[in-house]
């Protein structure tokens, strides 16, 4: 009984972490898109307003997004493994 409780608590924790990562990802995407546009404008020399650090910001945002995507993939894999294991051993969530 205690093992199943721990099992599902771990799954809940992973799902909560996954939600936070997806929220963080949603915040980074617009920043990345803006930095990509600004970097392109800077590289093409189309505007005096484009900042010289636009490409650095693009790279940082891109790297951060990749890290978040990797973490999301890892947590989703763990959740799938927990689901598969719980099915295999016949655990069911109890709704109190």
Image: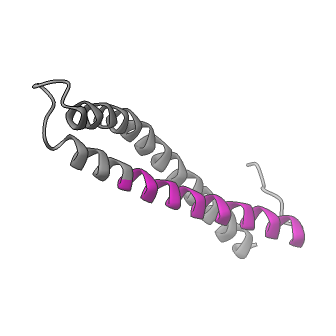
Q: Nearer the viewer, residue 67 or 35?
A: 35
Please identify the quadrant where the N terminus is shown: bottom right
Residue 37 coordinates in the image, percent (x, y): 31, 31
Q: Can residue 70 be found in the magenta stretch?
A: yes
Tell me which corner region of the image, top left, top right, bottom left or bottom right, holds residue 38.
top left
What residue do we see at 20% from left, 34% from top?
42
Report whether 6 appears left or right of 92. left
> Would you say 56 lies left or right of 70 here?
left
For residue 28, side relative to residue 41 (left or right): right
Q: Position of residue 70 (x, y in %)?
A: 52, 60
Q: Quadrant of residue 77?
A: bottom right
Q: Is residue 56 above or below residue 8?
A: above
Q: Kindly give the residue lying farthest to the bottom in the view shown.
A: 3
Name which quarter of the figure residue 82 lies in: bottom right
Residue 45 position in % (x across, y down)? 18, 31
* Residue drawn at 16 percent across, 24 percent down: 47
Front residue of this view, candidates 27 and 58: 58
Find the magenta span and give its range. 63-90
Horizontal side, residue 95 vs residue 19: left or right: right
Give the percent coordinates (x, y) of residue 54: 21, 40
Observer-nearest of 15 and 76: 76
Q: Main secondary structure of the magenta part?
A: helix
* Residue shown at the point (37%, 32%) measured from the top left: 30
- Colouring convention used in this rendered image of the protein: one colour
Q: Is residue 30 above or below residue 86?
A: above
In the image, residue 45 above or below residue 69 = above
């Amino acid at each position: 009984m205690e093992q199943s409780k721990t099992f599902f608590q771990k799954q809940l924790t992973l799902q909560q972490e996954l939600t936070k990562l997806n929220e963080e990802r949603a915040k980074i995407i617009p920043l990345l898109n803006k930095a990509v546009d600004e970097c392109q404008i800077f590289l093409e020399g189309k505007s005096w307003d484009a900042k010289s650090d636009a490409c650095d910001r693009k790279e940082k945002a891109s790297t951060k997004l990749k890290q978040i995507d990797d973490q999301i993939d890892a947590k989703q894999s763990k959740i799938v493994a927990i689901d598969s294991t719980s099915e295999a051993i016949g655990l069911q969530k109890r709704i109190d």
